[in-house]
Image (cartoon, rainbow, N blue to C red):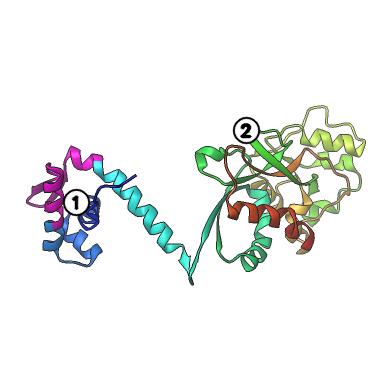
Amino acid sequence: MVRPYLPLNALRAFEASARHLSFTRAAIELRVTQAAVSHQVKLLEERLKTPLFKRLPRGLMITEEGQALLPVLKDSFDRMADVVERFENGHLQEVLTIGAVGTFAVGWLLPRLGDFRDRFPTIDIRLSTNNNRTDIAAEGLDYAIRFGDGAWHGTEAYPLFEAPLSPLCIPQIARNLHTPIAVTDYPMLRSYRGDEWSGWFDAAGVSPPHAGTKGIVFDSSLAMMEAAVQGMGIALAPPSMFSRLLLNGSIEQPFRIYTSRGKYWLTRLKSRTPTPAMKTFKNWLLGPAMTRF
């Protein structure tokens, strides 16, 4: 395809002027004179044979034709700027966008990302966290790290590991928990997955409370553990994700009894062709990251 000649200087002058609704502020951004910006916009209007602004005493008003042109130009210039900024020391920085369950991101991934950065300095990771509810396509993610059974429609899922749950609480509470049934003397903090405590009581060989599990319901294990640290009750959470709290003595694990409700998985859309950065991250995550720490 042979592209028509594009007056880039004029298009840049228009785009900046349209964002600021001012030739003067556009000139400051572009580091040229106000007259130069005005001249370039005038040349573009002549080329397109339509006015793009209404010149007002105190600024500019963009026309319908200008409104139609602006979003395309803004997106194009933003994308060009992003690519240019990704060059560092003669290398193109690849961008990898990952969404992860907050518990996994804080408790497992973040302590290891320094190793990834040292090994692969030309890959920039953009990490967003969630409460295990994510839309890979809508959020533009390369990968999503989720907790569950691995069955998500339209996705390729790679198993990472299980993170079995066990009661966690502050030492003052833990010293009073001599048997599993003693857990019922305290508020049992829980996630939106309502069967977790009953599964733990089954694993402990104890009948669950007849009145059912009572306590605050959280959509995030991070928030639930913060409540536990504040002494608000006993959390049922994966000890492996909160090793730092266990090591510093903020919380204790009174019983070595576990229940499992799934695994962590690395997932991507089947329709998403893996990029070199995606392949590198997958190989790192399923290889050295799993065995080195």
Mark number, residue 184: none
Residue at point 31% right, 44% down? 72
Q: Position of residue 143 (x, y in %)?
A: 61, 46
Using the image as rendered, state which of residue 172 and residue 133 is in the foreground.
133
Quadrant of image for the N terminus? top left
Of circles 1 and 2, which is in front?
2
Q: Quadrant of the C terminus?
A: bottom right
Q: Secondary structure at mark 1?
A: loop
Relative to residue 187, is residue 80 depicted above or below? below
Q: Which residue is mark 2?
A: 154
Helix, strand or loop at label 2? It is: loop
3D distance between C-alphas at marks 1 and 2: 44 Å
Give me the residue at 48% from left, 70% from top: 90
- The percent coordinates of residue 254 (x first, y second) are 86, 51
Magenta residues, start to end:
40-68
Residue occupied by mark 1 = 21
Amino acid type at mark 2: Gly
